[in-house]
Image: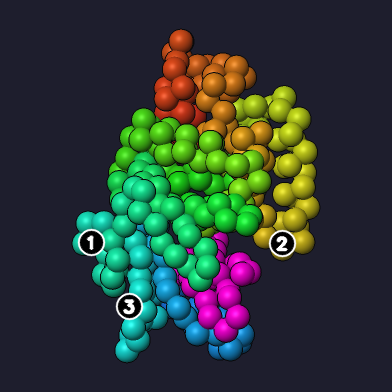
């Protein structure tokens, strides 16, 4: 099994999981780029995974499944056209020979789910919940929900590859350096990302280990992150959720 990025729109990645002459896509907001990928590589679409309802993640579903019998897995609720199999916490999905566990990860949206496989090399498809160096905006959920969603990821194996769906890494790291200007891992990673983007290279996937070392939204308990959050919010004695809430508000206005 191999995983490829299909760029879409200005900064989306539609992830293609390829096995022999079959492939599965994650969050196909644009059907045209998926079709071109399939034609170029002589592949047949096998299934679709959806993390949440936003159109840049779901807009291509109906065109891709038109006149075909293709399973479309996604959040429960009946609100996404084209979903054939609704999923909730602790459900599982088999993609080729890989079993993916489903996590409910609300925060960015209330319906958000993520997919994790720990077979062979651990893999996480996390949609817009976790980004490299950042997390999703809280369009529908609360800081408490996002904190607990991110906590599920923090406990995963460090070598888990993190396949998020936007190329936000450089802008996220610029903000992260405001929060933790003395974080040496973060400074080093920022330089690496600048070089990659100068070369028009992808910065994803990341890993859980890397994100735990550089991502302020996974580091609410760290003293420098807490102090920065308290200075920004003009509050003291913030708990971990309060820290996340403060830096999310800060990032929204950065």
Q: Residues within 10 Å of mark 1 (few under 14, many from 20)?
A: few
Residue drawn at (43%, 33%), measured in percent from left and top?
Answer: 147
Q: Is residue 6 above or below residue 144?
A: below
Q: Residues within 10 Å of mark 2 (few under 14, many from 20)?
A: few
Residue 44 located left or right of residue 145:
right
- Judging by the rendered image, the residue that carries numbered circle 3 is 62
Residue 232 located left or right of residue 208:
left
Write the start and end of the magenta stretch as one range.
Answer: 1-28
Q: Earlier in the sequence, mark 3 or mark 1?
A: 3
- Judging by the rendered image, the residue that carries numbered circle 1 is 79
Q: Residues within 10 Å of mark 3 (few under 14, many from 20)?
A: some
Q: Nearer the viewer, mark 3 or mark 2?
A: 3
Q: Does residue 88 appear in this view?
A: yes
Q: Earlier in the sequence, mark 3 or mark 2?
A: 3
Q: CA distance from mark 3 to mark 2?
A: 31 Å
Magenta stretch: residue 204 in it? no
- Please state which of residues 56 and 68 is positioned toward the viewer in this rendering: 68
Where does the image place residue 35, in percent across and percent down from the top left?
49, 83
Where does the image place residue 210, in percent across and percent down from the top left?
67, 41
**Split into 4 quadrants, where in the image is the N terminus?**
bottom right
- Judging by the rendered image, the residue that carries numbered circle 2 is 201
Q: Does residue 139 appear in this view?
A: no
Residue drawn at (57%, 56%), measured in percent from left and top?
Answer: 119
Residue 213 located left or right of residue 235:
right
Q: Is residue 117 above or below residue 245?
A: below
Q: Is residue 205 above or below residue 32?
A: above
Where does the image place residue 65, in percent across and percent down from the top left?
35, 81
User: Of helix, strand and loop, which one carries label 2?
Assistant: loop
Q: For the stretch drawn in magenta, what is the main secondary structure?
A: strand
């Amino acid at each position: 099994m191999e995983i490829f990025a299909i760029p879409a729109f200005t900064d989306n990645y539609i992830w293609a999981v390829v096995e022999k002459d079959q492939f599965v896509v994650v969050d196909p907001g644009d059907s045209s780029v998926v079709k071109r990928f399939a034609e170029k590589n002589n592949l047949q679409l096998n299934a679709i995974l959806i993390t949440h309802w936003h159109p840049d993640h779901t807009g291509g579903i109906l065109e891709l499944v038109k006149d075909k019998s293709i399973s479309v897995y996604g959040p429960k609720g009946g609100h996404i056209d084209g979903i054939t199999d609704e999923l909730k916490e602790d459900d599982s999905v088999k993609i080729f020979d890989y079993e993916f566990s489903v996590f409910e990860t609300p925060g960015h949206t209330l319906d958000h789910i993520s997919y994790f496989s720990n077979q062979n090399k651990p893999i996480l498809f996390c949609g817009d919940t976790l980004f490299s160096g950042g997390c999703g905006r809280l369009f529908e959920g609360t800081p408490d929900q996002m904190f607990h969603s991110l906590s599920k990821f923090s406990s995963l194996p460090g070598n888990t590859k993190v396949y998020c769906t936007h190329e936000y890494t450089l802008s996220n790291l610029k903000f992260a350096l405001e929060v933790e200007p003395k974080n040496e891992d973060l400074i080093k990673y920022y330089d690496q990302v600048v070089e990659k983007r100068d070369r028009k290279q992808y910065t994803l996937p990341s890993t859980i280990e890397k994100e735990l070392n550089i991502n302020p939204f996974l580091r609410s308990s760290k003293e420098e992150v807490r102090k920065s959050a308290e200075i920004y919010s003009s509050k003291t004695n913030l708990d971990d959720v309060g820290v996340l809430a403060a830096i999310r508000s800060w990032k929204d206005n950065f």
